[in-house]
Image (cartoon, helix red, strand yellow):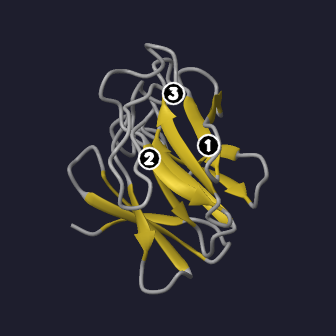
Amino acid sequence: MMWVIGGGAWQGPAGLTPPDTAPPGAPVTLHHQVDGNQLDAVFVDRNGVVSVMWVIGGGTWQGPVGLTPPNTAPAGAPVALHYQVDANQLDAVFVDRNGVVNVMWVIGGGAWQGPAGLTPTDTARPGTPVALHYQGSTNQLDALFVDGNGVVKVMWVHGGGAWQGPVGIS
């Protein structure tokens, strides 16, 4: 971890986990949870566990805490984070080791839920990156990924409803 306060000089780096927690170069994704006072860091560890770390305000980082069983995702697979509808629900989307697009979520300051598979097996290559963002307003969250045939696919959720798709858009 590296950090800067205000317009000061960058500090660090400082290690937050023991060595070999995640594969070298594994992506870590960051997003605020709930009110912007808690920052979550989500990554897939070297055992294929989707894990979370967090810091509240200017406090000390906590975790990592495993959210899934081992071998859920390929080690070091990317995870996308974004609010669904509003800042009360944070979604984490990833492609597991069976090529299934999965969603996990946390509401308020509660416990993480899922993963819940959104697609059949072999929809995408294991560990495929997923992009998440609102389409138009905050009422629709889109997830885009490339399937095993090279087709760009979109999935979406309106409000707090059920995920739809995937549908090819290329």
Q: Residue at x 38, y 52 (%)?
A: 130
- Identify residue for label 1: 54
Q: Quadrant for the N terminus, please.
A: top left
Q: Residues within 10 Å of mark 3 (few under 14, many from 20)?
A: some
Please report contact status of discs 1 and 3: CB closer than 8 Å, yes or no.
Answer: no
Q: Say what secondary structure mark 3 lies in.
A: loop
103 or 1: nearer the eye?
1
- Picture coordinates of residue 35 (x, y %)? 67, 67
* N-terminal label among 2 and 1: 2
What amino acid is labelled 2 in the image?
Thr
Q: Which residue is mark 2?
A: 29
Q: Is residue 25 above or below residue 39?
A: above
- Gap in Å between the C-alphas at discs 2 and 3? 15 Å
Q: Residue at x 65, y 53 (%)?
A: 105
Q: Nearer the viewer, mark 2 or mark 1?
A: 1
Whole-number angstrom distance, CA of label 2 to CA of label 1: 11 Å
